[in-house]
Image: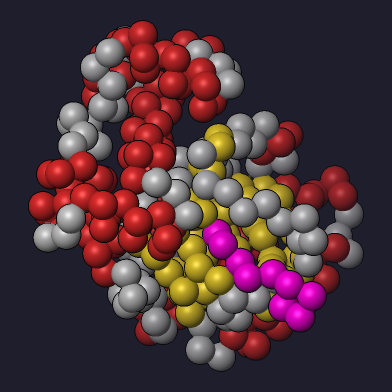
Amino acid sequence: MIFEHCSYLERSPITLGMYQDPKHFKQRFHFHPGIEIIFVHQGVGRLIVEQSIHDIKPGALLFIKPYQPHFLQMDISADQKYVRSLIKYDPNYFSEYLKAFPTLYQFHHQLCNDSAGAQVLHVTQFQHLEKFLLENYERLERHPMRNRMEDYALYLISLLRYLRPLWKTDTASKPAMLESVPAVAQMMVWINENYDKEFQLEALAQAVHLSPNHISQLFRKATGKTITEFLTDRRMKQACILLKTTGRSVQEIGEKSGWPNFNYFCHIFKKRMGMTPKQYRYH
């Protein structure tokens, strides 16, 4: 898993990339402090986020929360393109603009903080949303550069206003998991609930009523990652959040994240993040 520092958000706390064909799209597990909103114009694939696996197709709108490990796998070939619109932003910066709009502020807060909330919206008549995105962006591009961040914030406010009724009435209330791998979804839930404990493959296998060898093969085939890699991703996410949001000692954070051995925690953290836990805390 790769951590994206998103240092560019300090210079431009809201960035827009509309109707892009990312020819060198990197398919990898990663997480970052900012929020991503992705609208899929063309392309099919799947999104792995937390303990859910979602089918992705044209008209899908993805909301990725801060520090949330996710893996977007798109089927890209000469005959199958992946075209997206991508918005990245600092939620703390944007929330200041939203305070003047209590209903939208609450909607945005729910999207960011409701652990049971939907993160993939399949818009049934997505051409209307596509037109809305592009027309407003073209209008935005004609504005003077000195007001760029304010204009971007207003664009994002307009988008939330457009999406709020869709999120309640369209197909976002219960995001569909891939029916072919319900056991993998159960394994993800189990790992999310037990990542801070000593891991035993046999205990996970027993929880989903399958053999250890079978769940290892099943998980790898469905996600492209081993169970151990996914567990490490979940622990790393927790460590990063605690380092940035609490004053707990590095040793205590390692223990709370599932690594009681302090030296090993520091070793695996530096290997994954490219810096020590202390350096990350003050980065």
The residue depicted at 40 percent of the width and 31 percent of the height is: 236
Does 183 sit above or below residue 265?
Answer: below
| Residue 205 seen in the figure | yes
Q: Quadrant of the C terminus?
A: top right
The residue depicted at 71 percent of the width and 83 percent of the height is: 131
Does 52 sit above or below residue 76?
Answer: above
Q: How is the image coloured?
A: secondary structure
Answer with the quarter of the image where residue 235 lies.
Answer: top left
25 sits left or right of 121 in the view: right
Pick whichever, 55 or 6, lies toward us: 55
Tell which residue pokes out farthest to the front in this image. 213
242 sits left or right of 5 in the view: left
Pick whichever, 185 or 21, lies toward us: 185
Give the percent coordinates (x, y) of residue 16: 72, 56
Give the percent coordinates (x, y) of residue 204: 17, 48
The residue depicted at 85 percent of the width and 63 percent of the height is: 141
Answer with the quarter of the image where residue 128 lies.
Answer: bottom right
Query: Which stretch did the figure color magenta?
Result: 72-81
The residue depicted at 79 percent of the width and 75 percent of the height is: 78
Q: Is residue 192 found inside the magenta-colored segment of the image?
A: no
Give the percent coordinates (x, y) of residue 230: 38, 44
Does 44 sit above or below residue 252?
Answer: below
Give the percent coordinates (x, y) of residue 245: 38, 26
